[in-house]
Amino acid sequence: MIIALAVFAAIAVGSCMQRVSGMGVGLISGPILSLILGPVEGIMVLNILACINAGATTVVVRKNVVWSQVALLGSVLVLGSVPAAFLIAAMDTAPLLILVGVSLLIALAVVTLGKSYVPTISGRGPGIVAGIIGGFTNTLAGVAGPVFTVYFSAARWKQANLAATMQPLFMLGGGISFIVKAVVGAAAITSIAWLVWPAGALGMLVGISLGSLIAHRIEQAAARKFSLLVAAAGAIAAVIRGVSSL
């Protein structure tokens, strides 16, 4: 029951922040679920719930989605997911927990610092590269948002289009990551306690509903800072737990 409550809280906060700022489920819920359920099962749960969460959010923000970019990046996500799944299958729990935590910290550094140093880009090439890298990081650690954020920022997109277009990409990324992991045997859904699923679904419903209520009342910058702080704390905790388990 304690695990279910923790999953509910992690998904609720992440879903709320994703509705407000465009990112949140992967950054906030990823490190917490990795600590609670383990780096393999935790990210597997995150992939599935993030897919559903992003699908629901896509319906709300569909008018701002740039579907041509969804097609471009989404078509190559699997090219990054496959090697990440084989890497997961080959690693022990402690090193994998460290790798997930470090990946999240790198992602946080990219999303906070990277946007200030990337040049303006255009064409299909950068989008293809972003899609492959996003597929890898999403399968490994449940986070593709920082990669997509830097890409769309370099393309000088408006925030509304950026946040909206990432949602169907998160949906595709979560679904592809789950399928690839299952096919290569990197993770099994049967090893996850059944209470995790209703807890996650309820947390997602509460988070999206709350996020919809406060989206126009809270500054996106403030929501983003909160998301990054919680994510950093969780990532550091994952690294510490992994190191202590070696």
Image (cartoon, grey):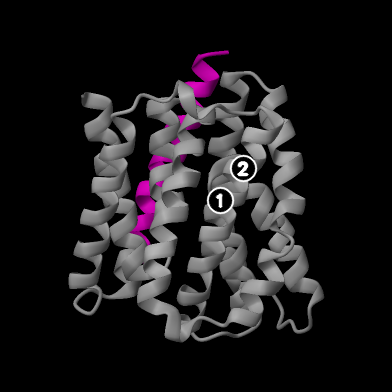
- The residue drawn where x is 52% and y is 22% is 242
Residue labelled with disc 1: 175
Q: How many labels sit on residues?
A: 2
Left or right side of 161 for 207: left
Mark 1 belongs to which amino acid? Answer: Gly
User: Image quarter for residue 35?
Assistant: top left
Q: Which mark is residue 179?
A: 2
User: Image quarter for residue 77?
Assistant: bottom right
Instruction: Please say whether residue 153 is visible from this viewpoint.
Output: yes
Q: In terms of secondary structure, what is the magenta stretch mainly?
A: helix
Mark 2 belongs to which amino acid? Answer: Ile
Counting other residues with Cα less than 10 Å from the Cα at mark 2, is it few (<14), some (14-19), or many (20 or more)?
Answer: many
- Image quadrant occupied by the N terminus: top left
Placement of 232 over or under 223, stated as above or below = above
Q: How far is the residue under mark 1 from the one under mark 2? A: 6 Å
Left or right side of 170 for 127: right
Q: Which mark is residue 142?
A: none
Image coords of residue 114 (percent x, y): 61, 65
**Magenta region, residue range:** 224-246
- The residue drawn where x is 30% and y is 46% is 201
Query: Is 124 included in the stretch rendered in magenta?
Result: no
The residue most toward the right is 125
Q: Are marks 1 and 2 in contact (CB under 8 Å)?
A: yes
- The residue drawn where x is 24% and y is 42% is 9
Instruction: Please say whether residue 117 is visible from this viewpoint.
Output: no
Placement of 20 over or under 6, stated as above or below = below
Counting other residues with Cα less than 10 Å from the Cα at mark 1, is it few (<14), some (14-19), or many (20 or more)?
Answer: some
